[in-house]
Amino acid sequence: MKKEGQMNLSFGMIFSILLIIFFVAFVFYVIPKFLDFQKRAQVGMFIQDFQEDIDKMWEGTYGSEEKTYNLPKKIEFFCFEEDSRIFFKPLGSGYGWDSKEIKHLKPMENGFCIENTDGEIKIIIKKDYGESLVDIEK
């Protein structure tokens, strides 16, 4: 009789240990995926908020406003190309948002980049009286 009870107990223990190993492995797999998803969403929200701020300034007659945006620290620079497109440096650090066209933004003669300092970038969005497009300054 004692042998059967010991066998059932050891099977239960082995099954419990296997379940614990499974759950721990699952957690180590899911948490990085969740954090990656969060950063991808943060970059997407940044692009959406930036476009909305450009649109608001474009709808007005004139104005100037300094805006602060949050980006993941993996992104070192937020850059503008000559054709009103934005991108992130180093290349591939935009979590799938490598390049995006921004509407109502004045084309620039020379593109430039703004440094991401501790997860924040500051941009001056302005529109002069009589101009039809919005301009960006560091």
Image (spheres, rainbow, N blue to C red):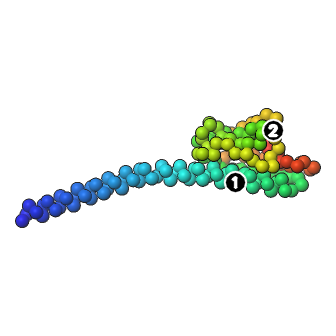
Q: Give the x, y percent position of residue 54.
A: 78, 52
Relative image position of residue 99 (x, y in whole percent): 67, 43
Q: Position of residue 95 (x, y in %)?
A: 59, 45
Residue 28 visible in image: yes
**In the image as oriented, which residue stretches furthest toward the left?**
1
Q: Is residue 2 left or right of residue 70?
A: left
Q: Earlier in the sequence, mark 2 or mark 1?
A: 1
Q: Residue 10, located in which quarter of the rendered image?
A: bottom left
**Residue depicted at 88% across the width and 52% down the height:** 62
Quick check: 118 left or right of 59? left
Asked if residue 114 shows in the view, the reply is no
Label 2 Cα neighbours within 10 Å, binned few <14 / some 14-19 / many ≥20:
some
- Quadrant of the image containing the C terminus: top right
Q: Is residue 74 left or right of residue 2?
A: right
The three-letter code of the residue at mark 2 reads: Met
Q: Secondary structure at mark 1?
A: helix
Judging from the image, what secondary structure is the residue with disc 2 in? loop
Name the residue carrying label 2.
108
Q: Circles 2 and 1: CB distance less than 8 Å?
A: no
Rounded to the nearest whole Å, what is the CA distance between mark 2 and mark 1? 21 Å
- Three-letter code, disc 1: Gln
Q: Residues within 10 Å of mark 1 (few under 14, many from 20)?
A: few
In which quadrant of the rendered image does the N terminus lie? bottom left
Q: Residue placed at 81% from the left, 41% from the top?
A: 107
The single residue placed furthest to the top in the displayed view is: 110
Residue at 30% x, 57% y: name it. Answer: 19
Disc 1 target residue? 48
Q: Which mark identifies residue 110?
A: none
